[in-house]
Amino acid sequence: MTGSVRETWGSRAGFLLAAVGSAIGLGNIWRFPGEAYESGGGAFLIPWMVAILTAGIPLLILEYTIGHRSRKSGPSAFRSMSKNAEGIGWWQVAVAILLATFYASILAWAVSYTFFSVTASWGDEPGAYFTEFLNVSGEVYQFGEFNWGIFGALAGVWVVSLVIMAGGVRKGVELANKVCIPLLVVLFGALVVRAVTLPGALDGLNTFFTPDWNALGDYQVWVAAYGQVFFSLSIGMGTMIAYASYLRKKSELTMTATTAGLANASFELLAGIGVFAALGFMAYNSGGPVIDEQNPIVGGGLAFVTFPTILNEMPGTELFGFLFFGSLVVAGVSSLISMLIVPLASFQDRFGWDRKKTVLVIGIPMALVSLAVYPTRNGPMILDAVDQAVTPYGLVMAGLASIIAAFASGKIGRLASDANRYSILKLGAWWYAFLGITAVVLVYILLFNLVPDQIDWYLNPKEGNTLSPDQVLITWSVGAASILFGLVMGVVMRNKPVPQTDEDLENAEEEASA
Ligand code: PHE
């Protein structure tokens, strides 16, 4: 790498599309409506909006500035803030590997269901069909029995994403997003138009939009909202640090981050509208309530059971099934590649490897691990356990760590002035204040809610707990392993300098003379 010029995005729009493509994913189409459903519909909307404005967008801006200023990804970017902070980048690399390996497998389910849509092969009992499809063994540790259909779809997902990654920033990531986003808007837009014109849709929308002021006092709703915002905006994992590191020097940052944040939120609302309209239609047909507390939608239920049930009841089952599952795949691929960039770009920048080498040495082994673990009969149980680790012990905690590092290194002011040079929205006291408040809220959430909940699941297994005690142990193990990896790498790499490119040297000179 030494001597070469860092790749950049083809245009400002190219970067923005990639940022939006990362943010819009399963988190919007599936996770958001599910969280809103569990929190009772309208109760979720206000905490969600507050979390976007006060935590989501300020953190997005922080990640943009870290990546843009250092023009490095992950560990090298944190190291340029402070030698003590490099471990945060490695921790995020581990989290990205955990997330990407299971996210890909959910995409593989969606790929399979896109094919099933052609003949609506889930039949009259989508619930039973899905159970048979996953064929879960019930034994968390019983590895090795593969579900070859899912295996094949997953292999396809990995081939496509690694080919995109091998293409680099412009000819890989940017191009893929230029295809995915317009396609997604068309597919999903058609679906939402259909959903809101179904009978009963209005009842569903009322449930979604009627705020429940009492619920604002329920901390669980707030915890869910913060988790959702981190996941959906792709923050806390270094994704945006990596993407922003490929920006040119004279780049607008703050308005771009705000635009990406709001675009993601709009798409999330659109998905909420589509899904709740469809739930209203289902309630209209059955005569039941839109949110049936007796019948919580958990895990894969919303996308792979509830949706096919609704599709069965409407004309054009096959077409709309294809649009829905196709949307999941398209939205998910552009998010998956933004997870892959974290380990790939980190190794490239920190060790001076070239792109081909990182795809071979890091990307392919990730694909193999994903293929070995998730398309098995116990895979979905591991998936649930790892999923529960990624948001709290990954995105939220590492996001918190990056705020602390930015303040503690004393570089936060420099990040702000760097951003302010070419940005429309100027960073000032408000930005520091939101980051500070977010840090306090996150500490509170972690110490008093997320961690105690999981301890309780472990100690008092009962029906309705999201995880079994065996699964909680996996959650903790992978969470702890990712943090440990960060710590160890932080120490091991401490005295090893980051390989410098000619461009870096120029930058350093410019900075010294400024
Ligand atoms: N934001 C993506 C989604 O909504 C998930 C994601 C999280 C992507 C973290 C990158 C980093 O599906």
Image: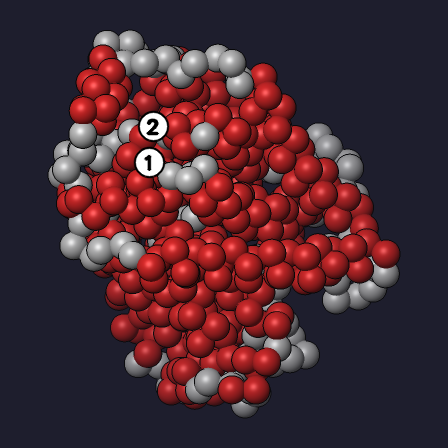
Q: CA distance from mark 2 to mark 1?
A: 6 Å
The label number, if any, that marks residue 67 in the structure image: 1
Q: Please name the amino acid that badge 1 sits on.
A: Gly
The residue at the far front in this view is 513
Provide the secondary structure element on which disc 2 rests. Answer: loop
Location of mark 2 (residue): 72
Provide the secondary structure element on which disc 1 rests. Answer: helix
> Front-most of 498 and 48?
498
The N terminus: image quadrant: top left
- The residue depicted at 17 percent of the width and 44 percent of the height is 421
| Contact between labelled residues 1 and 2, with CB atoms less than 8 Å apart | yes
The C terminus: image quadrant: top left
Image quadrant where residue 504 sits: top left
Q: Give percent across and percent down for residue 329.
A: 39, 48
Residue 463 appears left or right of 248: right
Circle count: 2
For disc 2, does the CB lie below 8 Å from ligand 1? no
- The residue depicted at 48 percent of the width and 12 percent of the height is 496
> Front-most of 99 and 286?
99
Please indicate, yes or no, whether residue 378 appears anywhere in the rendered image.
no
Residue 18 appears left or right of 399: left
Instruction: Estimate how packed mark 2 is, as few (under 14), some (14 to 19) or many (20 or more) residues with alpha carbons within 10 Å.
Output: many
Q: Give percent across and percent down for residue 367.
A: 51, 27
The label number, if any, that marks residue 379 in the structure image: none
Please indicate, yes or no, whether residue 195 appears anywhere in the rendered image.
yes
The residue at the far top in this view is 2
Q: Give percent across and percent down for residue 26.
A: 44, 53
